[in-house]
Image (cartoon, rainbow, N blue to C red):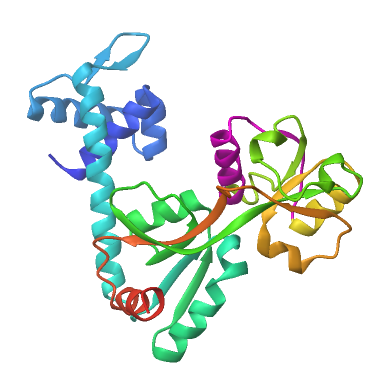
Amino acid sequence: MELRQLKYFVAVAEELNFRRAAEKLYIQQPPLSRQIRQLETELGIELFQRSKRSVSLTKAGKAFLDEARLTLAQAQRAVNVAQQATKTNQLIIGFSLCAFDRILPELIDKFRQQHPETPVNLIEMTKESQIQALLTAKIDVGFCYAPITNSELDSVTILSEPLVVVLPPEHPLVEQESIELRSLKSESFILCPKDIKPDAHEQIMQLCDQAGFQPKIVQEASPSEVQLRLVESGMGISLIAASCKTRHNARVVYLPLVEPVPLLTIAAVWHKKQPSLALSNFIKDCLFK
């Protein structure tokens, strides 16, 4: 069995059409069909049920698909690791804007002072893209919102800061000293856009879900200065990290949330089996020191 056959099988399994799979692979359909038949012969099982009108996976084919995808991903990771080993020792960092705003510049400065010989390469990425890049050895370390649930990755909390509620000055709740998140379920929210700041958006949605409601979003806006100006206009309320209060001068009211205060948590994350010397130095000298 060859990796090429696994690649062909996955393409057919995803398209459920030999012609489209062949086009996707840039090969002719007859050679593709022969390779799939050969694979089935080697395995001693049928992977597909074929008729004149349709193609579908057998039960064995569905089980084999998961393992084939895993094998191809592991093979690609091995290639990436080998390629990285031939390059100059460098530290490749994936980051979300949340981390760059708050903690990453300080860590990079610390690393460069201690390891001036090691180049640092920064790539802005979403949380999902960072996870995938770590699994395929395209970056050494990522910085994004927690939680990190993939069992192949290690992570450490870099920063946790409380959420605060942002209210227009005429809002009836401004006289309170603090407020429960769940008491905001009937409010109209102005939040960061999911397509621009997916990590922050996702974590705020999760915190609201834990408080027992889904926020009614009337407007998405970025950057945070725009969010605050819209709150100031009376369009709705917002939730932001407490550190943002000192960066803007919008005429709004900030209210703390009552205990337990929901936290926005930023984590550093890396692959458990990542062999990079630059990463080892970064973890040792910047994350745990």
The answer to which quarter of the image holds residue 140 is bottom left
| The magenta stretch spans residue 164 | no
x and y percentages locating residue 284 in the rendered image? 32, 78
x and y percentages locating residue 42 in the rendered image? 8, 30
The answer to which quarter of the image holds residue 83 is bottom left
Asked if residue 126 lies left or right of residue 8, the reply is right
Looking at the image, which residue is at 60% across and 69% down?
A: 102
Q: Which residues are magenta?
A: 199-222
Asked if residue 148 lies left or right of residue 77, the reply is right
| The magenta stretch spans residue 214 | yes
- The residue lying toward the viewer, choosing from 70 and 43, is 70
Looking at the image, which residue is at 51% across and 56% down?
A: 265
The N terminus lies in quadrant: top left
Asked if residue 173 lies left or right of residue 6, the reply is right
Asked if residue 170 is positioned above or below residue 210 in the image, the reply reads: below
Question: Could you tell me how many numbered marks the image carries?
Answer: 0
x and y percentages locating residue 41 in the rendered image? 9, 25
- The residue lying toward the viewer, choosing from 130 and 251, is 251
**Residue 171 shows in the view:** yes
x and y percentages locating residue 37 in the rendered image? 17, 25
Asked if residue 182 lies left or right of residue 270, the reply is right
The C terminus lies in quadrant: bottom left
